[in-house]
């Protein structure tokens, strides 16, 4: 800016903020419209010109969803699947990530490279035999069928390992000399030290599980076990004309993750930047 | 008792820590991947689902059948269209947003970042349904806005020429925030004195962008473009929810095609062959990335 005239600097700044506002509006409009339409009376969202705000705001569609259409059931399914997966993934990936970073054992680096190669394989390749495996275990149409394949994640192990590499060996050795077992060292020294990356891992796992569609769609056939995305995709088939009802369903599905993101966004950001430097 | 105990103790503790993850990954991911190779060489179908012994070894017949199927080539074209157009478009939007956030006043930075990232965390199925209505030819917000600048209404999801662009636009909206964060991190790592030196030499804002920012950011950009395209090759949910692969199959992607063969018609052998052809495509993209990457395997 130093060489520019004051007039052009003001113009540049105005253009910058105009562009920011346009970008921001484009990002938010679909979400705001979803929220607004969910409060409109039936038919109001299908008018020309489109109405942006509900003229007579109503909660009828939410009542309909939780009453007649039993959306609460699907929300509960989603919550169970996402919470159990997140809790399990934390324990499993944290211990593995730490061990790959800090413990010495024969074949460690070869095993890690073997896992790293798996990162390049698209998950869809595994899905067909995985379905047969889940079927033979009697887990089709159960929470377990959705949860178990999502517990261990190569990406999660990478994330934790990257962070755990920075733990000083002296810290761990001092505890070992004091006679602490490896499990003890992990619980009382490692876990508190890597807490930030655990928060990131927990958030990403919760988000990915809550939002996941293809695998639950394959494994869940009885609608009493549907998660929210699967239920919503089914509803839109029958109720495509009920725009306002579908928007209320979309709000119920999106709101929990959006609120979680707003509260804990620092950890989301760290997840992205950590992931990109791996 | 003591014998087994002692033997158990001889296993290095590290193995105990990685064992649960390793077992789960081998049983529920890498094992199935290997099994998929075998599956793609059999005629596994609805009958075999009831009794696996009904499946027979058919060699490469599934691959031959898929490669002669016009729908496969259409799905491949659609998928490449989505990835090759959608990938660069998304990264363009990411870079634009990153530059805006990077140059705005510090007190607005966090807000701008939050707003731009919000679409990324939303549930794809839910927002795909929202966009179905935004794209409505008569009542949709998009056609209304276009109407204000005298553009005739477009049947976004009902016209085979517009359906894929509509899905690309929606995916760009959903995903640009993710790579924006990576671009912001990349921008912040460019040494400030490079800009100062350029300014002293009388470089304009555009010249600084062209000759400092872009070259410094190129490795990051190249990496995220390819990673995004690889993710986009796995397109499934958007067409499943918004168009069911239509109209006239214009949005049927490889994964949707695989899903239909495997889980609607239960031709698991054929579906496994499609999955491996997709895998080959992804490997090809990864190799191109490694080969062309400015700094060798930048970031990998």
Image (cartoon, coloured by chain):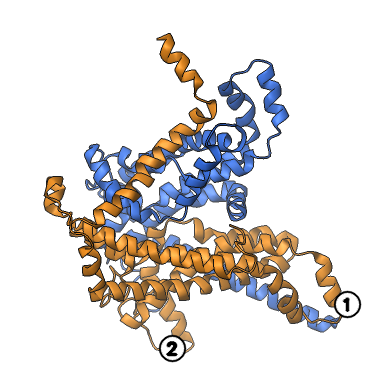
Mark 1 belongs to which subunit?
B
- Quarter of the image where the N terminus of chain A is located: bottom right
Q: Is residue A173 left or right of residue B58?
A: right
Q: Which chain is orange?
A: B
Q: Residue furthest top?
A: B2
Tell me where residue B40 appears, x and y as whole percent.
25, 57
Q: Is residue A209 visible?
A: yes
Q: Is residue A63 left or right of residue B21?
A: left
Residue bearing mark 1: B200
Q: Residue at x 11, y 49 (%)?
A: B54
Depth check: give the residue in front, A114 or A249: A114
The dot on residue B151 is 2
Q: Is residue A235 above or below residue B18?
A: below
Tell me where residue A28 appears, x and y as whole percent.
52, 65
Tell me where residue B278 appears, x and y as whole percent.
36, 64
Residues packed near mark 1 inside 10 Å, few (<14), some (14 to 19) or many (20 plus): few
């Amino acid at each position: 800016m130093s060489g520019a005239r004051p007039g052009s600097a003001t113009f540049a700044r105005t253009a910058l903020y105009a562009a920011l506002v346009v970008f921001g509006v484009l990002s938010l409009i679909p979400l705001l419209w979803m929220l607004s339409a969910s409060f409109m009376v039936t038919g109001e969202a299908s008018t020309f010109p489109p109405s942006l705000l509900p003229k007579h705001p109503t909660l009828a569609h939410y009542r309909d969803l939780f009453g007649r259409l039993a959306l609460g059931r699907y929300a509960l399914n989603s919550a169970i699947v996402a919470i159990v997966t997140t809790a399990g993934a934390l324990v499993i990936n944290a211990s593995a990530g730490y061990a790959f970073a800090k413990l010495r054992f024969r074949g460690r680096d070869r095993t890690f490279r073997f896992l790293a190669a798996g990162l390049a394989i698209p998950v869809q390749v595994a899905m067909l035999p995985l379905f047969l495996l889940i079927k033979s275990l009697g887990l089709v149409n159960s929470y377990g069928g959705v949860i178990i394949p999502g517990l261990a994640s190569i990406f999660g192990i990478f994330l934790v390992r990257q962070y755990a590499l920075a733990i000083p060996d002296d810290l761990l050795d001092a505890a070992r000399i004091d006679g602490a077992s490896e499990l003890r060292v992990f619980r009382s020294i490692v876990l508190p030290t890597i807490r930030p990356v655990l928060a990131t891992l927990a958030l990403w796992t919760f988000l990915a599980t809550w939002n996941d569609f293809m695998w639950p769609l394959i494994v869940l056939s009885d609608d009493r076990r549907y998660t929210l995305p699967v239920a919503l995709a089914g509803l839109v088939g029958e109720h495509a004309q009920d725009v306002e009802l579908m928007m209320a369903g979309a709000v119920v599905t999106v709101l929990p993750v959006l609120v979680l993101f707003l509260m804990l966004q620092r950890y989301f950001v760290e997840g992205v930047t950590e992931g990109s430097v791996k | 008792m003591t014998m087994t105990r002692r033997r158990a103790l001889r296993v290095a503790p590290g193995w105990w820590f990685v064992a649960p993850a390793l077992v789960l990954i081998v049983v529920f991911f890498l094992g199935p991947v290997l099994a998929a190779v075998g599956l793609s060489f059999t005629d596994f179908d609805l009958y075999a689902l009831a009794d696996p012994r009904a499946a027979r070894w058919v060699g490469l017949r599934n691959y031959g059948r898929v490669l002669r199927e016009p729908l496969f080539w259409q799905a491949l074209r659609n998928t490449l269209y989505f990835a090759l157009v959608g990938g660069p478009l998304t990264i363009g939007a990411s870079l634009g947003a990153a530059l805006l956030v990077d140059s705005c006043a510090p007190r607005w930075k966090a807000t701008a970042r939050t707003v731009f990232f919000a679409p990324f965390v939303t549930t794809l199925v839910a927002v795909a349904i929202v966009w179905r209505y935004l794209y409505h030819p008569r009542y949709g917000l998009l056609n209304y806005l276009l109407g204000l600048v005298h553009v005739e209404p477009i049947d976004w999801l009902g016209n085979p020429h517009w359906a894929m662009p509509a899905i690309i636009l929606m995916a760009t909206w959903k995903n640009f925030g993710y790579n924006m964060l990576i671009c912001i991190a990349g921008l912040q790592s460019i040494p400030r004195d490079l800009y100062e030196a350029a300014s002293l030499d009388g470089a304009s804002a555009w010249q600084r962008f062209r000759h400092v920012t872009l070259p410094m950011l190129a490795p990051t950009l190249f990496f995220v473009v390819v990673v995004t395209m690889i993710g986009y090759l796995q397109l499934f949910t958007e067409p499943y929810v918004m168009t069911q692969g239509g109209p006239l199959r214009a949005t049927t992607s490889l994964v949707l095609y695989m899903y239909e063969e495997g889980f609607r018609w239960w031709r698991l052998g054929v579906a496994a062959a499609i999955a491996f052809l997709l895998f080959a495509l992804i490997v090809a993209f990864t190799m191109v990335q490694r080969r062309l990457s400015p700094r060798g395997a930048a970031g990998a």
